[in-house]
Image (spheres, coloured by chain):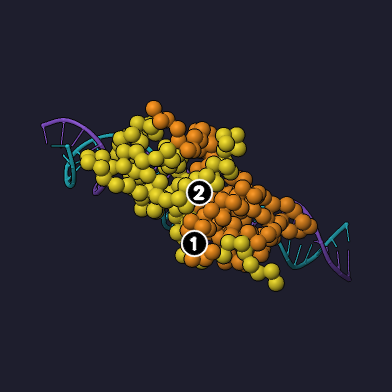
Chain colours: A orange, B yellow, C cyan, D purple
DNA sequence: TGACCTTTATCGAAATAAATTTAATATGTA
DNA sequence: TACATATTAAATTTATTTCGATAAAGGTCA
């Protein structure tokens, strides 16, 4: 009867988590998160760093925002984006140590 | 000139990581990982726990195996599956604390 | 205020890619 | 042979990605 999983996620949380993972599971969006790991940046700077169109970046940012992975605030004419919270930062750290063995 | 991102992932690693995240970013596959967090299980047991067809589970397991997230070994007529390594376990922990605030 | 520039968001549409489901069959073990 | 798992295929459906054009919101300056 050893019935305990380490991760007893409820269905709701499974759904929420899988949506967030899916959102992060796109190369451009993951790149955006890496770029933001240094701190807040306006959208235009992200565009410059990741190399695609403004429209495209804006849409990807929106997807990350929807899932609570990224947050943003207006500063004058600019929108400053950042990684939403410390939990997400931790998650990114865990990913880095999982997937970037040599880059620590 | 503060040019350093916390996460300086190379393009290759970004691609690898995003593929793995995408693989985990599916409710059924995440559920399979949760179910396996308690230890090794044969495929038939996973089928029973997650509730779908054998063929479907087998296909999802394959996707996780391809990305190095899950490993398996034969034991007689059964295939025992488990979460691939400690890094992935850490990642699952990070996800749990991010997405399951009340279930700790 | 009005004209204009910058920054970001949104829309429409085309192209592409996945995911789902089911069924049939193959493989390997006891 | 029967059981456990994997593979394949095909049909179907659904979603994603991307681009270009344009809209909206804020800032500047005459």
Camera-side mark, 1 or 2? 2
Q: Residue at x 68, y 59 (%)?
A: A39
Residue wearing tag 2: B90
Q: Is residue A104 visible?
A: yes
**Where residue B78 sits: x, y (%)?**
26, 40
**Where residue B46 sits: x, y (%)?**
35, 36
Residue that lies at the very extreme toward the top in this rendered image: A1
Residue A79 sits above or below residue B99 on the image? below
In the image shown, does C30 or B92 lie closer to the viewer? C30
**Where residue A51 sits: x, y (%)?**
57, 66
Residue A24 sits above or below residue A12 on the image? below
State which quarter of the image contains the C terminus of chain B.
top right
Secondary element at tag 2: helix
Q: Is residue C30 left or right of residue B75?
A: left
In the image shown, does C24 or D25 lie closer to the viewer? C24
Chain for numbered disc 2:
B
Mark 1 → mark 2, Cα distance in angstroms: 14 Å
Mark 1 Cα shell of 10 Å, populated few (<14), some (14-19), many (≥20): some
State which quarter of the image contains the N terminus of chain B.
bottom right
Quadrant of the rendered image containing residue B43: top left
Chain for numbered disc 1:
A
Q: Residue at x 53, y 53 (%)?
A: A94
Q: Is residue B80 left or right of residue A99?
A: left
Quadrant of the rendered image containing residue A68: top right
Mark 2 Cα shell of 10 Å, populated few (<14), some (14-19), many (≥20): some
Q: Is residue B99 left or right of residue D5?
A: right
Q: Residue at x 35, y 49 (%)?
A: B71
Q: Which mark is residue A100?
A: 1
Q: Is residue B47 left or right of residue C15?
A: left
Q: Residue at x 26, y 45 (%)?
A: B74
Secondary element at tag 1: loop
Q: Is residue A27 visible?
A: no
């Amino acid at each position: 009867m050893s019935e305990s999983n380490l991760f007893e996620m409820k269905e709701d949380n499974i759904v929420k988590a899988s949506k967030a993972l899916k959102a992060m599971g796109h190369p451009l969006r993951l790149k955006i998160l890496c770029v933001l790991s240094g701190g807040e940046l306006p959208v235009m700077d992200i565009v410059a760093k990741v190399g695609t169109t403004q429209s495209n970046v804006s849409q990807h940012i929106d997807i990350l925002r929807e899932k609570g992975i990224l947050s943003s605030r207006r500063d004058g004419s600019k929108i400053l984006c950042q990684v939403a919270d410390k939990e997400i930062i931790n998650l990114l750290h865990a990913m880095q140590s999982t997937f970037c063995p040599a880059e620590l």
